[in-house]
Image (tube, rainbow, N blue to C red):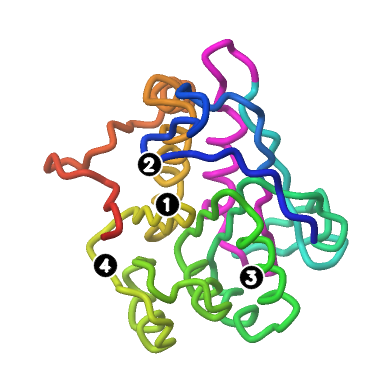
Amino acid sequence: MPKAPVMPVDPAGECAFAGTRCTRRRRVAILLFDEVEVLDFAGPFEVFAVARTALGDAAFDVMTVALEPGEVATRNGLRVVPGATTGSLEATDILVIPGGPGTRREMTNPQMLEFVGTASCSAELTLSVCTGALLLGAAGLLAGRSATTHWAAMGELEALDSGATLLPGSRVVDNGSLVVCAGVSAGIDGALHVVERLLGRPQAEATALAMEYDWTGFDRDGRPLVTAAS
């Protein structure tokens, strides 16, 4: 797979060589598989599809991708037709790996793990949601990183012995090129955080407002939703 062109970005979301916010349109690929959790992929899809630059242009080209062509049967029976297969996918800037019961099957699927490993390493940024962290761990991408997942799957993530530092109380963990979210709705917060990093706070706030999503970057107790990996 060809390596995606990467715009250097510092932790504040600035173009490293330009000193200004990056506003080029990035390609977002959202991975689908049978028994994927609907909001795990639909939440980030909505965030990236709604996000606009300061000039009002679409900031991201968003698509869904699966290993094979044809319908994907998500958790609870919703059927979705992915826009591309992994074999036909062009270079991707942002890779989204959702969770769901299907991750337990896919984390032993060599074809899936090969795609996740290759695509994540060539992308500018990977965002996992819920038990998508199990796929990251099984693909060897969590070693030396910090991670979280759905509270009910924390024991499974720990049992992988992936080399990750687990942060059970964190909703979103930012490792720079790897952002790992807790369960289901946390993927919306993680995607908004990515928008804030890449486009700036006003664009993230405008995206949340357009979605009528109550987002400040803090929980109800005033604690940040995002934990920066040490």
Asked if labels 1 and 3 touch by Cβ distance under 8 angstroms, the answer is no
Q: Amino acid at mark 4?
A: Leu
Residue 1, placed above or below residue 104:
above
Query: What element does badge 3 sit on?
Result: helix
Q: Residue at x 48, y 27 (%)?
A: 199
Which residue ends up furthest to the left in the rendered image?
A: 221
Q: Residue at x 48, y 34 (%)?
A: 16
In whole angstroms, how far apart are the C-alphas of marks 2 and 1?
Answer: 7 Å
In whole angstroms, how far apart are the C-alphas of marks 3 and 1?
Answer: 17 Å
On residue 176, the disc is 1
First in residue order: circle 2 vs circle 4: 2
Task: Check the picture and name the quadrant holding the C terminus.
Answer: bottom left
First in residue order: circle 2 vs circle 1: 2
On residue 185, the disc is none
Mark 2, mark 3: which one is toward the viewer? Answer: 2
Q: Residue at x 39, y 31 (%)?
A: 213
Of the pair 226 and 34, the residue shown nearer to us = 226
The residue to which callout 2 is attached is 11
Mark 2, mark 4: which one is toward the viewer? Answer: 2
The residue to which callout 3 is attached is 117
